[in-house]
Image (cartoon, rainbow, N blue to C red):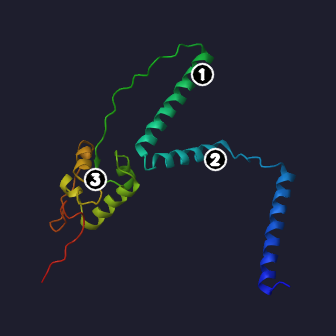
């Protein structure tokens, strides 16, 4: 004879099994495991979320390169389809004027603008903003290096793309302190 605890466990497993049978029966009645599609806007939003997750992955540079290549292939295919429909020749390459990059002012920019810089992801952008809010403007590339995760090589890569409009506070830590305040000894 089962104990009361064993009876409860058997009752629980029987309920789970019955629930599973009920779900399978409901799926069979409504047509199996068909995917219920939403609107085209919902699908586009989901694709954009997946693409942004791929772009934000640890291999962000590889993901972005693959995404750019995929988008370029889609655009070329679309141009070829449109050209075939209208009977116009397809240009072999699209010539674009060189883009001018506006420097980002790290003493004022919000986190999304900072994320647009190469090699800076969301976490590092948040750290830059938090450090700036805590210790004041950076004022220079040396001041920016006080943020944990920004060393000399990253600072050198960012130099042509950033600017600083503020003056650092006199008591702000330097790049060597990495944002930590040192306790003065008595």
Left or right relative to 100: residue 46: right
The residue singled out by tag 2 in the image is: 42
Using the rendered view, name the quadrant where residue 166 is placed: bottom left
Look at mark 1 in the image and give the residue it sits on: 81
* Rendered position, 89 above or below 107: above
Q: How many marks?
A: 3
Q: Quadrant of residue 146?
A: bottom left
Q: Where, quadrant-wise, is the N terminus in this rendering?
A: bottom right
Numbered disc 1: secondary structure:
helix
Location of the C terminus (image quadrant): bottom left
Judging depth in this view, the residue of 152 and 98 nearest the camera is: 152
Nearest the eye: 153 or 155: 153
Residue ID at (43%, 50%): 58
Residue 30 picture location, percent across and down: 84, 51
**If you read the primary sequence from the N terminus, does the residue marked by circle 1 or circle 2 appear first?**
2
Q: CA distance from mark 2 to mark 3?
A: 35 Å
Position of residue 145 relative to residue 65, above or below, is below
Q: Residue at x 49, y 30 (%)?
A: 72
Picture coordinates of residue 10, whole percent (x, y): 81, 76
| N-terminal-most mark, 1 or 3 | 1
Q: Secondary structure at mark 2?
A: helix
Q: Residue at x 23, y 56 (%)?
A: 145
Residue 29 lies, in percent from the top left, at 87, 53
Q: Is residue 186 left or right of residue 108?
A: left
* Mark 2 or 3, nearer chain start: 2
Single out the residue that lies furthest toward the front.
Answer: 1
Label 2 neighbour load within 10 Å: few <14, some 14-19, many 20+: few
Q: Say above or below: 76 vs 114.
A: above
Q: How far apart in space, not on screen, are marks 1 and 3 (Cα)? A: 44 Å
Q: How far, Cα to Cα, is label 1 from label 2?
A: 25 Å
Q: Which residue is mark 3?
A: 106
């Amino acid at each position: 004879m089962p104990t009361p605890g064993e009876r409860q466990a058997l009752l629980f497993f029987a309920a789970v099994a019955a629930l599973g049978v009920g779900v399978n029966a409901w799926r069979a009645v409504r047509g199996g495991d068909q995917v219920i599609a939403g609107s085209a806007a919902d699908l586009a939003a989901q694709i954009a979320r997946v693409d942004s997750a791929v772009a934000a992955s640890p291999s962000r540079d590889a993901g972005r390169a693959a995404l750019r290549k995929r988008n370029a292939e889609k655009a070329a295919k679309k141009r070829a389809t449109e050209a075939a429909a209208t009977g116009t020749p397809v240009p072999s390459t699209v010539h674009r004027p060189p883009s001018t990059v506006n420097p980002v002012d790290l003493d004022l920019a919000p986190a999304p603008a900072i994320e647009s810089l190469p090699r800076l992801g969301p976490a590092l952008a948040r750290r830059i903003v938090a450090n700036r809010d805590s210790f004041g403007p950076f004022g220079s590339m040396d001041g920016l290096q006080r943020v944990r995760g920004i060393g000399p090589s990253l600072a050198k890569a960012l130099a042509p793309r950033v600017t600083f409009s503020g003056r650092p506070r006199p008591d702000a830590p330097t790049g060597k302190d990495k944002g930590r305040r040192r306790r003065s000894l008595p």
